[in-house]
Image: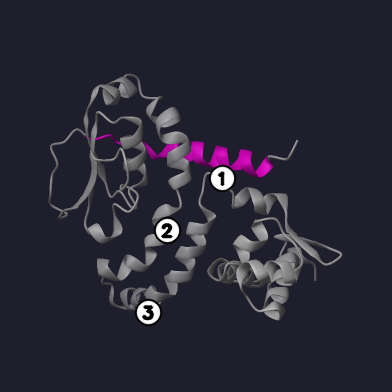
Amino acid sequence: MSDDDLPPFFAHLGGTFAVILLQVGRQTGLLDAVLAGGGTATDIAGRAGSDLRNTDEWLRGMTVAGYLTHDDGVFAPTQMTATTFSPAFPVSANSVLDGLWAAPQVYDDVVAAVRSGGGIPSERLVAYAPFAGVNTPTYEQALVGDWIAAVPGLTERLAAGARVAEIAPGNGAAAAVLGRAFPASTVVGYDLATSRSGTATRGPCLTRVRSTSSTASTRSTTWAIRWLSWPAYDDCWRRMAWCCSARPT
C-alpha cells in the first residue's frame, strides 16, 4: 500500500504528532533554541535549559517530520521552517501553537455543547485567547498600506482625525496599528469580554486607542470601518504563498 492509498485517518495522524511535538518545543524553549541558529543536541539543550536526551529525541522527531535538517550531529531549521516562524511571515505560527496547547481545556465544554445543543460560556473560551494573535503580523504588514489604502479617501479621513469602532477586536492588534498610523483618530474596540481584548493596545503613542466591554444589544453611533473579508484574506494568503516560496539569494 502506497502513501496515496492510506485512509485519511492515518494520513492525518503523522501530522498530528508532528504538531504536538512542535507545541512541546514551543513550551520548553526548544523551538526557539533551534530557530536561533541550530547546533548539536548539546548546544540546543544548553540554550533551552532542557534535558540532553529528551532534546535529542525532540530534534530527531522534528527532523523526521521535515522541520529540521541533520548533518553530522548538527541540527538546523529548514528554510521553510525558518520562514514560517519568522516575524516577516503574515501569520503568527507561534500563536497557533499556543492556542492549540490551550485548546484541550475547552474540549469537555465542546462535547457537552454538542450533546445538549447549548452554548459555551464566554469565560470558558478564554483558553482560546492565543489564537487572537494569529493575524497580528498581517495587520502590521497590510492593514494601513494595502487594505485601508485601497479604499478611496479613507487614508486622508483617518489622517485628519476620525472616530473608529472595531467590533470584536481580539487582542487589539488592528486597533494598535491604526493608532500608531493615525494618531489624530480615536479607535475604540468593542467586545463582549474585556479580558480577551486590548492586550496589544498598550504603550506609547496609543493614548487614543482603547477597548471596552459591551452587550450584544449595544449599538454604536461611532463611525465604523467595515472590513470586507474576501480581499483581506486573499491578500493574507497571497503574502503567505510569497513567503513560503521565497528562497535566500
In this picture, residue 196 sits left or right of residue 73: left
Residue type at mark 3? Asp
From the top left corner, tell me how far across and down residue 194 is, in percent: 23, 57
Q: Mark 3 to mark 1: distance in Å? A: 33 Å
In terms of sequence position, does the residue under pointer 2 or pointer 3 come before the other? Answer: 3
Magenta range is 224-245
Task: Name the residue rendered at 87%, 65% in the picture.
Answer: 72
Q: Which residue is tagged 2?
A: 131
Q: Residue at the far right: name it.
A: 72
Say few, some or many: other residues with alpha carbon within 10 Å of mark 3 (under 14 / 14 to 19 / 20 or more).
few
Q: Which residue is tagged 1?
A: 89
Q: Which residue is tagged 3?
A: 108
In this picture, residue 239 sits left or right of residue 181: right
Asked if marks 2 and 3 touch (Cβ < 8 Å), the reply is: no
> Does the segment drawn in magenta span residue 185?
no
Q: Give 209 or 67, whichever is nearer the viewer.
A: 209
Quadrant assignment for the C terminus: top right
Frontmost of labels 3 and 1 is 1
Task: Name the residue rendered at 48%, 37% in the picture.
Answer: 141
In this picture, residue 226 sits left or right of residue 50: left
Q: Mark 2 to mark 3: distance in Å? A: 19 Å
Q: Which mark is residue 132?
A: none
Q: What is the secondary structure assignment of the residue under circle 3? A: helix
From the top left corner, tell me how far across and down residue 230 is, in percent: 43, 38
Q: What is the secondary structure assignment of the residue under circle 1? A: loop
Residue type at mark 1? Phe
Q: Height in image: 73 above or below 233? A: below
In terms of sequence position, does the residue under pointer 1 or pointer 2 come before the other? Answer: 1
